[in-house]
Structure formats: C-alpha cells, structure tokens
Image (cartoon, rainbow, N blue to C red):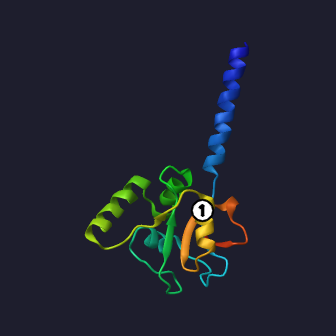
Amino acid sequence: MKTKTIVLSIVAMMGMALGVAAQAQVAVIVGAKSAVGAMTADQVASVFLGKSNTLPNGATAQAADQPESAAVRELFYTKVTGKQAAQVKAAWSRLVFSGKATPPKELGSSAEVKKFVASNPDAIGYIEKSAVDGTVKAVLTVD
C-alpha cells in the first residue's frame, strides 16, 4: 500500500512540474533605457535567425542567446520562430559558413543574458518572464 502511495505522489509531482513548465512564459528583453518599445514575433525571429541585424529603431542588434541546454531556449525558438533549436543551429551553421552573419552571443544563464542586455543599449535577449526586473524591459512576451 505504501509503494502505491509513493508512486502516485511521484506521478502527481511530475505532472505538476510539467504543468509549470508548460505554463512558463518567455520575455524578449531590451535594456530599460532602450528606445525600442515593442517588437513583433516576426521582428524578433528575424534577428535571432540571422535574417536581420537591426532593431526597430535602426540600431544594430546585439543578440544574446541562452545555452543550448536551457529549457527557455527551446521554448523561445519554438514559440517565436516556429523552429526547434536543432533547426536553428543548422540554419546558423549555413549562415556562418557562407559568411553572411554572426550568430547571437551565447551566454551561460538568464542572469547573464539580463546583465548583458541591461548594460548594452543595442542588446536583445530572452529570459523567463518572471526574471524581468527594472534593469530591462519586455518588448515581447510568449507563452
């Protein structure tokens, strides 16, 4: 009887964890003092897929990416670009090889992305919406 209770408890906790992950929101961020107020998913996707290197205000974008192992990275690329992280990596490999573009700067965590974006007026990145504070502003939020 105890084993069944433990198994059911574990299954319930896993379900709650998956529910939380499924409800996570990603915020695309710029510095708090950036002139960029809002961006569409297409504008953001263009920057992170190497199709454009400018922000809506005309500044050259300095994109910051999360580590490949970060769940927020997969969620961002799936929701904003409609592509899985592996597809994005393959696309960037082609662009880099052809000399057409430089991929976003990969940083080690959401905290590092937020710090980079907060200190650079032309930077753009993405973090968990819950991590947005007064040092950055969200220009796009996706579920």
The C terminus - image quarter: bottom right
Q: Residue at x 46, y 63 (%)?
A: 81
Identify which amino acid the numbered label 1 is placed on.
Glu
Q: Does residue 64 appear to the left or right of 31 in the view shown?
A: left
Residue 90 seen in the figure: yes
Residue 63: x percent and y percent? 49, 71
Residue 46: x percent and y percent? 43, 72
Residue 143 seen in the figure: no
Q: Residue at x 64, y 35 (%)?
A: 14
Q: For mark 1, what is the residue?
A: 112
Residue in front for this viewpoint, 41 or 65: 65
Does dot 1 land on a helix, a strand or a loop?
A: helix
Res. 36 image quadrant: bottom right
Q: Does residue 141 appear to the left or right of 85 in the view shown?
A: right
Q: Does residue 45 appear to the left or right of 34 in the view shown?
A: left
User: Pointer 1: residues within 10 angstroms few (<14), some, or many (20+)?
Assistant: some
Task: Tell me how many marks there are.
Answer: 1
